[in-house]
Image (cartoon, helix red, strand yellow):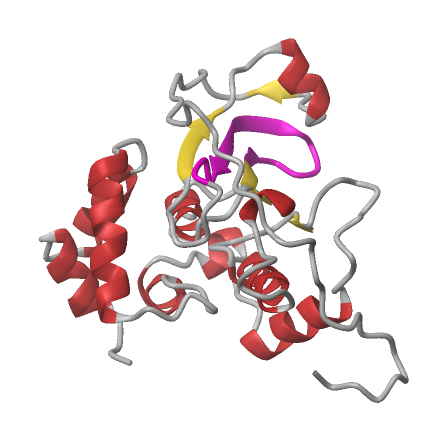
Amino acid sequence: MAKLGRNELYTIAGVNQHAEFEKFISDLLFKPKERNDFYKKILAINSNVSTDTFREYFEEYAAERKSQQQDFTPDSVSELLAKITRNDNSSESGWSGYDPTAGTGSLIIKKWNDDRLSETPFSYAPHNYLYMVEEFGDNVIPYLLHNIAIRGMNCVVIHGDTLERNIKQIYFVQNSHDDYMKFSDINVMPHTDKVKEEFNVSNWSEKAIEHVESDKVAYIPALPMHRKHIITFGDGDDD
C-alpha cells in the first residue's frame, strides 16, 4: 500500500506549502462534491482506514506541542483501549464511543474500526453506531472532521473547551446513506437553547454557521447486530 505523505497530499490538493494545504482542507469542509473527490483520491493512494489518515502529516507539520500540548496516542494503546471497551453497544449514555480530547481522531478511529470489525459485513450498519468527540484546537478541527467523514461515521464533533463548556460550533457528521461504503455529510448544529442544553454549553464563543447537507436519511436493513466476544480480563481471549 502506497505511502500517503506530504508530497502526495500536496499533489492532490494542488498546493506547495503547509499554509496552503490547511486552507485547502478548511475550504473543503462545506463543499461536499469537492470534498468527496478529495477523499476518493486519498483512498486511491492508501485505502487503509484503520488508522488516522492525517496523523503523520499533522505530527510533522501542524502539531502545536508547546502552546497547545498537542500529542498523540500510539496505535497500540488505541487498539488496546478499543478492545477492552468493546461492549454490546447498549451504553446508557447512548454513545458508541467518546473522546473529550480527540485531536485528529486517532483514538475514536480505532474504536470505530474495532466496532465494525467485531461484526460481519451483513450485520454492520452505520446507523447502529453514534460517536462523540470534543476538541479545542482550531487548527485540528478540519483534520478531525475529514477523518470522520471519509470513514462514513456518525459522530457529533464539539469544537470548544471541554471543561469550561465555551463552545464555538457543534458538528453532526452523518452517514445519511446508511452505507459503510459511502462518505458522511458534514452538518453544523444551530445555536439554539435546545442544542445548548443537550450538550451542556455554557456559552457560544463564535457566531453560528448555517450549513446542513443531510436531507433525506436512508435506513438500510441489516441482519441483527452480531458482535464478537466481549473481552473481559482473565478470559484468555486475545482476539
Q: Position of residue 128 (x, y in %)?
A: 64, 46
Q: Is residue 76 left or right of residue 34?
A: right
Q: Position of residue 227 (x, y in %)?
A: 71, 64
Q: Quadrant of the C terminus?
A: bottom right
Q: Nearer the viewer, residue 125 or 132?
A: 125
Q: Position of residue 187 (x, y in %)?
A: 44, 28
**Which residue lies most toward the bottom here?**
236
Q: Nearer the viewer, residue 210 or 223?
A: 223
Q: Quadrant of residue 162?
A: top right
Q: Which secondary structure is most common in the magenta stretch?
A: strand
Residue 176 position (above or below residue 238): above
Q: Quadrant of residue 133?
A: top right
Magenta segment range? 158-177
Q: Is residue 220 left or right of residue 62?
A: right
Is residue 108 in sight in this rendering?
A: yes
* Residue for point 26% across, 45% down: 36
On whether residue 108 falls in the magenta region, the answer is no
